[in-house]
Amino acid sequence: MKTIMHPCLPFNDMERVDFKVNGKKIHLAVEGSTGGTSLGLHAAADIIAAKGRVLWASSEMPDPARFSQLFEHLSLVESSRFHAMNFGGRFDKAIDAILEAMHGLPSVKFVVLDDWCDGSGRIPVNSINEVKRLAEHTPEEVGLLLISKGTVDASGSSSENILPRGKEAMTKAGFEAWTLERSQKGGQRILKREGEPTELMIEDSGFKI
Protein backbone atom coordinates (compact mmCIF):
# COMPACT_ATOMS: atom_id res chain seq x y z
CA MET A 1 0.00 0.00 0.00
CA LYS A 2 1.50 3.32 -1.05
CA THR A 3 1.11 6.66 0.67
CA ILE A 4 -0.53 9.25 -1.58
CA MET A 5 1.96 12.01 -2.40
CA HIS A 6 2.34 14.83 -4.88
CA PRO A 7 6.10 15.51 -4.82
CA CYS A 8 6.11 17.62 -7.99
CA LEU A 9 3.66 20.25 -6.80
CA PRO A 10 4.97 23.45 -5.19
CA PHE A 11 3.55 23.73 -1.68
CA ASN A 12 1.48 26.83 -2.44
CA ASP A 13 -0.17 25.02 -5.37
CA MET A 14 -1.24 22.02 -3.32
CA GLU A 15 -4.93 21.35 -2.83
CA ARG A 16 -6.67 22.09 0.45
CA VAL A 17 -7.87 18.82 1.96
CA ASP A 18 -11.56 18.00 2.09
CA PHE A 19 -11.78 15.52 4.96
CA LYS A 20 -15.34 14.55 3.93
CA VAL A 21 -16.63 14.32 7.49
CA ASN A 22 -20.29 14.89 6.61
CA GLY A 23 -22.41 12.24 8.27
CA LYS A 24 -19.40 10.19 9.45
CA LYS A 25 -18.64 9.02 12.97
CA ILE A 26 -14.85 9.20 13.40
CA HIS A 27 -12.43 8.43 16.21
CA LEU A 28 -9.14 10.18 15.40
CA ALA A 29 -6.13 8.94 17.37
CA VAL A 30 -3.16 11.29 17.16
CA GLU A 31 0.50 11.15 17.93
CA GLY A 32 1.27 13.88 20.46
CA SER A 33 1.31 17.45 19.08
CA THR A 34 0.81 16.48 15.44
CA GLY A 35 -2.17 18.71 14.69
CA GLY A 36 -5.27 16.82 15.81
CA THR A 37 -6.99 19.98 17.01
CA SER A 38 -5.97 21.78 13.81
CA LEU A 39 -7.52 18.97 11.76
CA GLY A 40 -10.75 19.33 13.69
CA LEU A 41 -10.78 23.10 13.22
CA HIS A 42 -9.95 22.73 9.52
CA ALA A 43 -12.94 20.41 9.02
CA ALA A 44 -15.14 22.66 11.16
CA ALA A 45 -14.27 25.70 9.03
CA ASP A 46 -15.22 23.76 5.89
CA ILE A 47 -18.59 22.78 7.38
CA ILE A 48 -19.27 26.41 8.33
CA ALA A 49 -18.26 27.62 4.85
CA ALA A 50 -20.90 25.19 3.51
CA LYS A 51 -23.57 26.92 5.70
CA GLY A 52 -23.48 24.38 8.51
CA ARG A 53 -23.18 24.90 12.27
CA VAL A 54 -20.49 23.32 14.46
CA LEU A 55 -20.48 22.27 18.11
CA TRP A 56 -17.00 22.01 19.65
CA ALA A 57 -16.56 20.44 23.09
CA SER A 58 -13.31 20.14 25.01
CA SER A 59 -11.81 20.56 28.46
CA GLU A 60 -9.76 23.41 26.98
CA MET A 61 -10.75 25.80 24.22
CA PRO A 62 -8.65 25.91 21.01
CA ASP A 63 -5.69 28.26 20.97
CA PRO A 64 -7.11 31.66 19.86
CA ALA A 65 -4.24 32.34 17.46
CA ARG A 66 -4.61 28.94 15.77
CA PHE A 67 -8.37 29.38 15.60
CA SER A 68 -7.93 32.76 13.91
CA GLN A 69 -5.56 31.30 11.33
CA LEU A 70 -7.88 28.46 10.37
CA PHE A 71 -11.01 30.65 10.31
CA GLU A 72 -9.38 33.65 8.62
CA HIS A 73 -11.27 33.07 5.35
CA LEU A 74 -14.65 33.15 7.13
CA SER A 75 -16.64 36.26 7.97
CA LEU A 76 -17.62 37.14 11.54
CA VAL A 77 -21.19 36.09 10.78
CA GLU A 78 -19.99 32.72 9.51
CA SER A 79 -17.65 32.26 12.48
CA SER A 80 -20.59 32.80 14.83
CA ARG A 81 -21.85 29.36 13.74
CA PHE A 82 -18.99 27.82 15.76
CA HIS A 83 -20.22 27.04 19.29
CA ALA A 84 -17.59 26.12 21.87
CA MET A 85 -18.56 24.14 24.96
CA ASN A 86 -16.51 23.03 27.95
CA PHE A 87 -16.67 19.46 29.22
CA GLY A 88 -16.25 20.30 32.89
CA GLY A 89 -17.75 18.10 35.59
CA ARG A 90 -19.35 14.76 34.76
CA PHE A 91 -18.87 13.45 31.23
CA ASP A 92 -22.46 12.17 30.97
CA LYS A 93 -23.77 15.68 31.74
CA ALA A 94 -21.50 17.10 29.03
CA ILE A 95 -22.97 14.60 26.55
CA ASP A 96 -26.46 15.67 27.65
CA ALA A 97 -25.54 19.31 26.97
CA ILE A 98 -24.14 18.46 23.54
CA LEU A 99 -27.28 16.54 22.59
CA GLU A 100 -29.49 19.37 23.80
CA ALA A 101 -27.53 21.92 21.74
CA MET A 102 -27.43 19.60 18.71
CA HIS A 103 -31.20 19.27 18.63
CA GLY A 104 -31.93 22.82 19.80
CA LEU A 105 -29.78 24.83 17.37
CA PRO A 106 -30.55 25.04 13.64
CA SER A 107 -28.35 23.49 10.94
CA VAL A 108 -25.91 21.64 13.20
CA LYS A 109 -23.82 19.55 10.79
CA PHE A 110 -20.66 18.72 12.75
CA VAL A 111 -19.79 17.92 16.37
CA VAL A 112 -16.21 17.68 17.64
CA LEU A 113 -15.07 16.30 20.99
CA ASP A 114 -11.40 17.24 21.38
CA ASP A 115 -9.30 15.42 24.01
CA TRP A 116 -12.48 13.68 25.12
CA CYS A 117 -10.64 11.15 27.30
CA ASP A 118 -7.44 10.96 29.33
CA GLY A 119 -4.25 11.14 27.30
CA SER A 120 -3.01 7.66 28.23
CA GLY A 121 -4.21 4.35 29.55
CA ARG A 122 -7.34 2.38 28.79
CA ILE A 123 -10.41 4.44 27.92
CA PRO A 124 -13.02 3.84 30.65
CA VAL A 125 -16.02 1.77 29.64
CA ASN A 126 -18.44 4.43 30.87
CA SER A 127 -16.79 7.04 28.59
CA ILE A 128 -17.14 4.74 25.59
CA ASN A 129 -20.75 4.08 26.52
CA GLU A 130 -21.42 7.82 26.65
CA VAL A 131 -19.96 8.53 23.20
CA LYS A 132 -21.90 5.52 21.91
CA ARG A 133 -25.04 7.16 23.29
CA LEU A 134 -24.04 10.40 21.59
CA ALA A 135 -23.56 8.57 18.27
CA GLU A 136 -26.92 6.80 18.58
CA HIS A 137 -28.73 10.13 19.05
CA THR A 138 -26.80 12.03 16.39
CA PRO A 139 -28.77 12.49 13.13
CA GLU A 140 -27.34 10.62 10.14
CA GLU A 141 -26.41 13.83 8.31
CA VAL A 142 -24.35 15.18 11.23
CA GLY A 143 -20.61 14.39 11.34
CA LEU A 144 -19.11 13.40 14.67
CA LEU A 145 -15.36 13.62 15.32
CA LEU A 146 -13.70 12.41 18.52
CA ILE A 147 -10.02 13.34 18.94
CA SER A 148 -7.75 11.61 21.44
CA LYS A 149 -4.13 10.65 21.98
CA GLY A 150 -3.22 7.32 20.40
CA THR A 151 -0.94 4.66 21.82
CA VAL A 152 1.91 2.47 20.60
CA ASP A 153 2.08 -1.30 20.49
CA ALA A 154 4.46 -2.21 23.30
CA SER A 155 4.58 -5.84 22.11
CA GLY A 156 6.02 -4.85 18.75
CA SER A 157 3.55 -7.09 16.91
CA SER A 158 1.95 -4.20 14.98
CA SER A 159 3.48 -2.45 12.00
CA GLU A 160 1.56 0.74 12.83
CA ASN A 161 3.35 3.64 14.56
CA ILE A 162 0.22 4.83 16.34
CA LEU A 163 -2.89 2.88 17.37
CA PRO A 164 -6.33 4.07 18.47
CA ARG A 165 -7.16 3.13 22.03
CA GLY A 166 -10.38 1.18 22.51
CA LYS A 167 -10.55 0.48 18.78
CA GLU A 168 -12.72 -2.64 19.02
CA ALA A 169 -15.28 -1.01 21.31
CA MET A 170 -15.32 2.19 19.27
CA THR A 171 -15.79 0.25 16.03
CA LYS A 172 -18.74 -1.58 17.59
CA ALA A 173 -20.13 1.83 18.55
CA GLY A 174 -20.09 2.80 14.86
CA PHE A 175 -16.89 4.88 14.65
CA GLU A 176 -14.32 4.78 11.86
CA ALA A 177 -10.71 4.55 13.08
CA TRP A 178 -8.41 7.34 11.85
CA THR A 179 -4.84 8.08 12.94
CA LEU A 180 -2.60 11.12 12.49
CA GLU A 181 1.17 10.83 12.89
CA ARG A 182 4.38 12.57 11.92
CA SER A 183 6.03 11.69 8.65
CA GLN A 184 9.77 11.21 8.45
CA LYS A 185 9.78 14.16 6.03
CA GLY A 186 10.01 17.28 8.13
CA GLY A 187 6.71 18.95 8.93
CA GLN A 188 4.56 16.53 6.96
CA ARG A 189 1.86 14.36 8.50
CA ILE A 190 0.39 10.99 7.60
CA LEU A 191 -3.36 10.61 8.00
CA LYS A 192 -4.72 7.07 7.87
CA ARG A 193 -8.44 6.71 7.33
CA GLU A 194 -9.44 3.11 8.03
CA GLY A 195 -5.81 2.23 7.33
CA GLU A 196 -5.56 4.12 4.02
CA PRO A 197 -2.58 6.55 4.25
CA THR A 198 -2.45 10.07 2.85
CA GLU A 199 0.60 12.30 3.23
CA LEU A 200 -0.29 15.87 4.10
CA MET A 201 1.40 19.21 4.55
CA ILE A 202 0.26 21.48 7.36
CA GLU A 203 0.39 25.28 7.15
CA ASP A 204 -1.24 28.20 8.96
CA SER A 205 -4.50 27.90 6.99
CA GLY A 206 -4.80 24.14 7.40
CA PHE A 207 -3.88 20.90 5.68
CA LYS A 208 -2.96 20.48 2.02
CA ILE A 209 -2.33 17.50 -0.21
Image (spheres, rainbow, N blue to C red):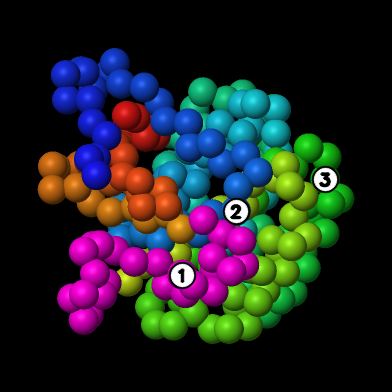
Is 22 part of what is drawn in magenta?
A: no
Count residues near mark 2 (Cα–Cα under 10 Å), then give few for <14, some for 14-19, many for 20+.
Answer: many
Mark 1 belongs to which amino acid? Lys
Residue 188 — which label? none
Please give the residue where the numbered disc 3 appears in the rendered image.
105
Q: Secondary structure at mark 3?
A: loop
Count residues near mark 1 (Cα–Cα under 10 Å), then give few for <14, some for 14-19, many for 20+.
Answer: some
* Percent coordinates x, y for residue 33 in the rendering: 31, 57
Mark 3 belongs to which amino acid? Leu
Is the N terminus in the top left, top right, bottom left or bottom right quadrant? top left
Q: CA distance from mark 2 to mark 3?
A: 20 Å
Residue 25 — which label? 2
Residue 133 falls in image quadrant: bottom right
Specify the farthest residue to the right: 104
Residue 167 — which label? 1
Magenta segment range?
Answer: 152-176
Q: CA distance from mark 3 to mark 1?
A: 31 Å
Would you say residue 11 is visible in this rendering? yes
